[in-house]
Image (cartoon, grey):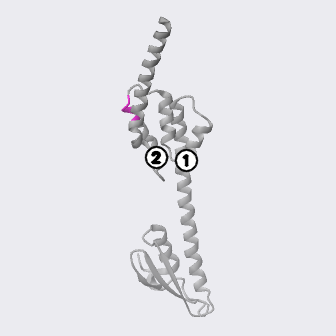
Amino acid sequence: METFRNYAAQTNANMVQMHSKVHMAVSYAPDIDQLQNEPLRSYIEKFKTTKSKIANLNEEVALAALRNGLWFSSRFREELTVRQPATLDDALHKALYFARAEEETAYLALKLEALGRMSAIYTAGLLARNREDGETDVFVHDVNRPVEDEFSATFLCKGYMREKNERLRHFTISSHRARAGRPFCPVEVDRRR
């Protein structure tokens, strides 16, 4: 009976200690929830900072807090669920790979978006110049961004610009079919530098 009491007392002490650690981890949890659209790298840094404030944090509790704090549709959360890491260090190391992949995907998406905008501006300029006769009005938005600014100035030409404000430019481009030798841009644009 004494052995049972010792076992029960030890188990109770372990439960109290575990409860204390879980309580500490949970009390910091609001600080380590990943926000929607928050980069994984940012969340991991936030997690590490919070983790460093907790002495003797149980590895399982830390892994659970890491996983539970991730945004619900995070690929890394899915990875932690499907392929449970052996240690917290393994999980944090794997997070770096996912963060790199996330950053590369974001970079490529921006690059692709810029390419799409550049081709649209270029195509609008060519179509306007190849029109049978008359003029074509072309509007370019988001010219506060470098890609739109440079491409509209280059392919639609500042000499054809009629109006502008912070984010929008209006160009009126005449047909070039009637005059075969007409320069791509009016002469005054060539002297803009």
Q: Is residue 25 above or below residue 131?
A: above
Q: Which residue is mark 1?
A: 74
Q: Is residue 19 above or below residue 109?
A: above
Label 2 sits on residue: 34
User: In this rendering, does residue 49 appear at all?
Assistant: no
Magenta span has 99?
no
User: Residue 48, located in which quarter of the rendered image?
Assistant: top left
Q: Secondary structure at mark 2?
A: loop
Q: Are marks 2 and 1 in contact (CB under 8 Å)?
A: yes
For the record, the magenta segment spans 49-54
Helix, strand, or loop for circle 1? loop
Residue placed most toward the observer, 7 or 133? 7
Could you give the CA–CA distance between mark 2 and mark 1, rounded to whole angstroms? 9 Å
The answer, for residue 133, to whether it is visible in the render is yes
**Most common SS among magenta residues:** helix
Residue 76 position by quadrant: top right
